[in-house]
Amino acid sequence: MGHRLTRIYTRTGDDGSTGLGDGTRVPKDHPRVAAYGEVDELNSVLGLVLAEPLPEPVRAVLAEIQHRLFDLGGELAVPGRAVIDAGDVEALERALDTLNEDLPPLRDFVLPGGGRAAAACHLARAVCRRAERALVALARAEDVNPESLRYLNRLSDLLFVCARVAARAAGEPEVLWRPKPRP
């Protein structure tokens, strides 16, 4: 391990700025800081998902994703750095295909729910979409690794499928959206 945190507080951010991995200081509301903050929140929500009973294939894929999200946060903390690659996106696609294989096809939208684990997956999916929006906002101002954008887009799809698998494993029904009838 390269660096050990021996002191947690530094006081350097008391003025509302933070240091990026390349040593530059930016305001704490900078789009880059917002993007890696959203990725950090997503990783924390995945920690909550993993605290729930889950089918082992879902648990295994989400545990690995936590490591990739830490990689993504590190990537975003250093302008110009790229860590997430096409292989990471392809791994998500393989997991999506495998987990989706035994699910019944959808004909309606599914409401968040289906038991605690499934609901937590839905929350993670929503936070993932927010992280993706933050990354898109950053990409308007600075160069962003396009594979990272693809990764978050695919991850939100995977989290939706994980929610469906978790609901099914728990014996919970999926709640289908009933749109309000039009007058």
Image (tube, rainbow, N blue to C red):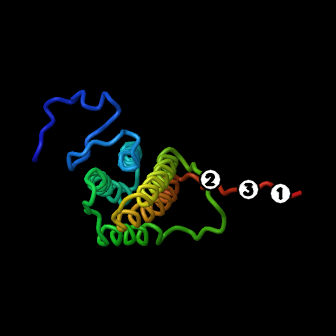
Camera sees residue 41: yes
To which residue does mark 1 refer? Answer: 181
Query: Dot 3 surroundings within 10 Å: few (below 14), some, or many (20 or more)?
Result: few
- View extreme (left): residue: 2
Q: N-terminal of the two: label 1 or label 2?
A: 2
Q: What distance separates the C-alpha of mark 3 from that of mark 2?
A: 9 Å
Which amino acid is tagged 2?
Answer: Leu
The residue sitting at 36% across, 40% down in the picture is 27
Q: What distance separates the C-alpha of mark 1 from that of mark 2?
A: 17 Å
Query: Dot 1 surroundings within 10 Å: few (below 14), some, or many (20 or more)?
Result: few
Which amino acid is tagged 3?
Answer: Arg
To which residue does mark 2 refer? Answer: 111
On the rendered structure, is 180 left or right of 102?
Answer: right
The disc placed on residue 6 is: none
Q: Pointer 3 and pointer 2: residues touching (CB < 8 Å)?
A: no
The disc placed on residue 178 is: 3
Which amino acid is tagged 1?
Answer: Pro
Of residues 11 and 1, the one drawn nearer to the viewer in this rendering: 11
